Image (tube, rainbow, N blue to C red):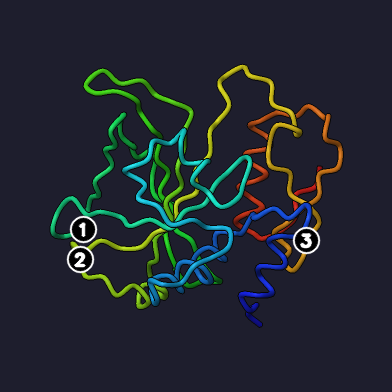
Amino acid sequence: MEMSNKEEDQINSSPGFRFQPTDNELLTYYLSKKTKNAKFSARAIAEVDILKIQPWDLPSNAKMGDYEWYFFCKRISKYQDGSKAIRATEAGYWKSSGRDQEIYRGISLIGTMKTLVFYKGRPRRERTGWVMHEYRLDGDLSVHNSSRPGDDEWVICRVFEKPSRGKKTYISDIEKPTTPLHDSSYSALTDADQYFDYNRFKAEHRARRQLGRPVRS
């Protein structure tokens, strides 16, 4: 059963609320609605032109989030067939990293996630810690995307800054999921002073978002 805007607003404004949807939820609930109705808005996802804002300025343009931030954006096609997108900003550019990840609901393909890393400067470039996960509809859900090849299409971008190599990261420094309000994708981390390994956290966080299961700490 879907929540009304009033119910969603009450949950999003509750003390301790953290917005940490699974990949499936981002595609099936938020992005599919946005592609069907451009006026659709979500309390936790801001709408921005991702190429006009530098990554370090994105947090101040987000609706909520301390560690990761979500945005509705238009993917601007570089070529008529839509195979590539424009990634340059005033300060640098977003570069694809690794292969696109296919996202399934059961056995049905519903979307893809592309990982991009921001490089500062041109032509001499400097890799930064800013990372973007770009979610697009595909497969069964692509029917909701009314754009034709070459047209700009709605995507959801999840942006976060990866800690520098060797930097000690504490749970108190990141967005701490809280007890689930209405979905099993939330988890509780109680010891705010506990030091942990970032790579381990990243792997567990990815697994939880994929499976919609709480992480055990």
Q: Earlier in the sequence, mark 2 or mark 1?
A: 1
Q: Residue furthest bottom?
A: 1
Residue 76 vs 106, above or below: the answer is above
Horizontal and vertical percent for residue 3? 65, 77
Mark 1 Cα within 10 Å, few/some/many (few <14, many 20+)? some
- Label 2 and label 1: CA atoms lie apart by 5 Å
Q: Earlier in the sequence, mark 3 or mark 1?
A: 1
- Callouts 2 and 1 close, C-beta under 8 Å: yes
Q: Residue at x 63, y 41 (%)?
A: 66
Q: Nearer the viewer, residue 151 or 15?
A: 15
Horizontal and vertical percent for residue 41? 49, 67
Question: In front: mark 3 or mark 1?
Answer: 3
Task: Look at label 2 and name its amino acid.
Answer: Pro
The disc placed on residue 5 is: none
- Label 3 and label 1: CA atoms lie apart by 38 Å
Q: Is residue 74 left or right of residue 9?
A: left
Task: Look at label 3 and name its amino acid.
Answer: Pro
> Tag 3, which secondary structure?
loop
Residue where numbered disc 3 is placed: 180
- Callouts 3 and 1 close, C-beta under 8 Å: no
Q: Residue at x 69, y 59 (%)?
A: 185
The mark tally for this picture is 3
Residue where numbered disc 1 is placed: 82
> Tag 1, which secondary structure?
loop
Residue where numbered disc 2 is placed: 149
Quadrant showing the N terminus: bottom right
